[in-house]
Amino acid sequence: MSEILDIEKLKEKIAHFAQERDWQQFHNPKNLAMALTVESSELMEIFQWLNLEEAAKICDDPNKKIEIEDELSDILVYVVRLAGVLNVNLPNAIEKKMKKNALKYPAELVKGSAKKYSEYKNRK
């Protein structure tokens, strides 16, 4: 089943969760950014010593899949909470960033390449 994620509802739910626990006092931009980094590191730790084949098949292990789901959820929660605290409209910000990325990485120029945008010789 495919569901569309309602960022505004999620933002409200996370804010309510924090408010019920009196955690908003800790949820300043610095602390949330740090927590986001910690959670991202915990996701990386799951993959740390795996080769490419093992990494590609990691979700075949139900326990590892749960770990990954938990870490991805933690990351998204902190992203959404930080956006709420900073009053960032994530859907709009994502739309703007995708437009910037499309200009930096034109499909006809970068298809199949992992180079950074500044490395392309034939920029328009």
Image (cartoon, rainbow, N blue to C red):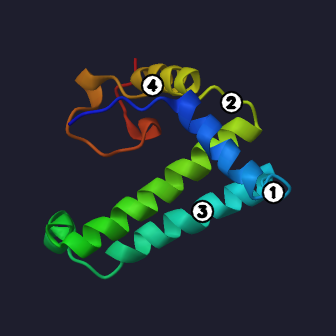
Choose between 79 and 122: the one closer to the eye.
79
Of callouts 3 and 4, which one flags the residue occurring earlier in the amino acid sequence?
3
Q: Position of residue 84 (x, y in %)?
A: 70, 37
Of callouts 2 and 3, which one flags the residue occurring earlier in the amino acid sequence?
3
- Amino acid at the residue labelled 1: Asp
Q: Are marks 1 and 4 in contact (CB under 8 Å)?
A: no
Of callouts 3 and 1, which one flags the residue occurring earlier in the amino acid sequence?
1
Q: Indicate left or right for 104 with 25 as reference.
A: left
Of callouts 1 and 4, which one flags the residue occurring earlier in the amino acid sequence?
1
Q: Which mark is residue 98?
A: 4
Q: Indicate left or right for 113 with 29 as reference.
A: left
Q: Where is residue 78 in the image (x, y as percent from the top left)?
A: 60, 52
Q: Indicate left or right for 23 with 57 as reference.
A: right
- Amino acid at the residue labelled 3: Thr
Choose between 76 and 57: the one closer to the eye.
76
Q: Which mark is residue 88?
A: 2
* Other residues around mark 1 within 10 Å, as few (<14) / some (14–19) / many (≥20): few
Q: Residue 37 carries which label?
A: 3
Please state which of the two labelled residues, at mark 3 or mark 1, is closer to the viewer.
1
- Amino acid at the residue labelled 2: Val
Q: SS for tag 3?
A: helix
Q: In this view, does 41 lie above or below 7?
A: below
Of callouts 1 and 2, which one flags the residue occurring earlier in the amino acid sequence?
1
Please give the name of the residue rendered at 60% of the width and 41% of the height, measured from the top-left corner: 13
User: Where does label 1 land, which residue?
Assistant: 22
Please give the name of the residue rendered at 80% of the width and 52% of the height, measured from the top-left corner: 24
- Amino acid at the residue labelled 4: Met
Q: In this view, does 91 lie above or below 63?
A: above
Name the quadrant of the C terminus: top left
Q: SS for tag 2?
A: loop
